[in-house]
Image (cartoon, helix red, strand yellow):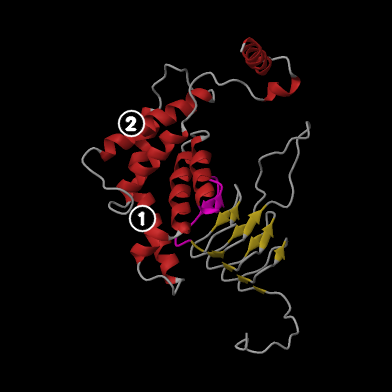
Amino acid sequence: MPMITDTLKDTAARLAQESVPEYKFIPRPACLLPGIAGIGKLMNEAKAMLFPGFFSHADGNSMERLYSLLDEQIGRALCCFGQQSPAGKTAQEPALAFIQQLPEIKRLLATDIKAVYDCDPAATSYSEVLFCYPAIQAMMHYRIAHELLLMDIPVLPRIITELAHSATGIDIHPGAKIGEYFSIDHGTGVVIGETCVIGNHVRLYQGVTLGAKGFTLDNDGLPVNVPRHPIIEDNVIIYSNSTILGRITIGHDSIIGGNIWQVYSVPPHSRVIQRKATSAFTDGLGI
């Protein structure tokens, strides 16, 4: 037993060493980090306020609980990432400002629900879309996270969208700008980068990537955060497994077919498709 105890103590001491060169990139937090469990509770309360009865039942104290959770988690984020002192109370103002944006968030999500329903003949009701479809789960997290990002709240927006990413397979950076009536069909494997700008009535299918073609580097060889993801104008459809890279523009009312690799802008009303393969397949009913 003494040998085990000595080994444990020695390993703990080695982990605590600050002289290891690689460790210097990961500083020890000065205060409590935002908590994953707390953020999960925050999202549950937000969903209850936005759509009562679908995820949990809002009651007379739901708004107060949501405000309290926002105050706590925003305060931790601001404290840990150097924007206020540990004793500061500046989280109250952004928490209240976010609460005031909930009606607009709900309005935008209602347009997303309608867009998904209108584009999917398998959907039986708006309620089914809201309750079951992973795209709407991802968009609830994104629209909440995006609003927090606009308020310059660090880290918290990214955690919120990554929770949705883990649950749905849809990866939307909170910094992306997404218009009204946005829909994703199926959704698994969709990636939307930080500086994407997406217009109204845009539809994506599974496996679509809106990514960066390359990075601008500073004098130290580190990537610079500049616009590097696509602009998708209004009324665009992008079919499954297509990859759109770089700061290019897909003009309005365009269709990008499946499995396309697109690195150049296309004008409005474009149709980008693969050449058809030659085949002599029957109707397949003899299987």
Please state which of residues 9 and 265 is positioned toward the viewer in this rendering: 9
Instruction: Give the residue pinned by disc 2.
Output: 68
Going from the N terminus, do you reach mark 1 or mark 2 first?
A: 2
Q: Residues within 10 Å of mark 1 (few under 14, many from 20)?
A: few
- Can you see residue 128? yes
178 part of magenta stretch: yes
Residue 216 vertical position relative to residue 179 in the rendered view, above or below: above
The quadrant in which residue 273 appears is: bottom right
Q: Residues within 10 Å of mark 2 (few under 14, many from 20)?
A: some
Q: Amino acid at mark 1?
A: Arg
Q: Which mark is residue 28?
A: none
Residue 197 image offset from top left, x and y in percent: 57, 54
Q: Secondary structure at mark 1?
A: helix
Q: Is residue 169 left or right of residue 70?
A: right
Please state which of residues 96 and 119 is positioned toward the viewer in this rendering: 119
Q: Amino acid at mark 2?
A: Ser
Instruction: Give the residue pinned by disc 1.
Output: 107
Give the main secondary structure of the magenta stretch.
loop
Residue 51 image offset from top left, x and y in percent: 31, 52
Question: Which quarter of the figure is the C terminus placed in?
Answer: bottom right
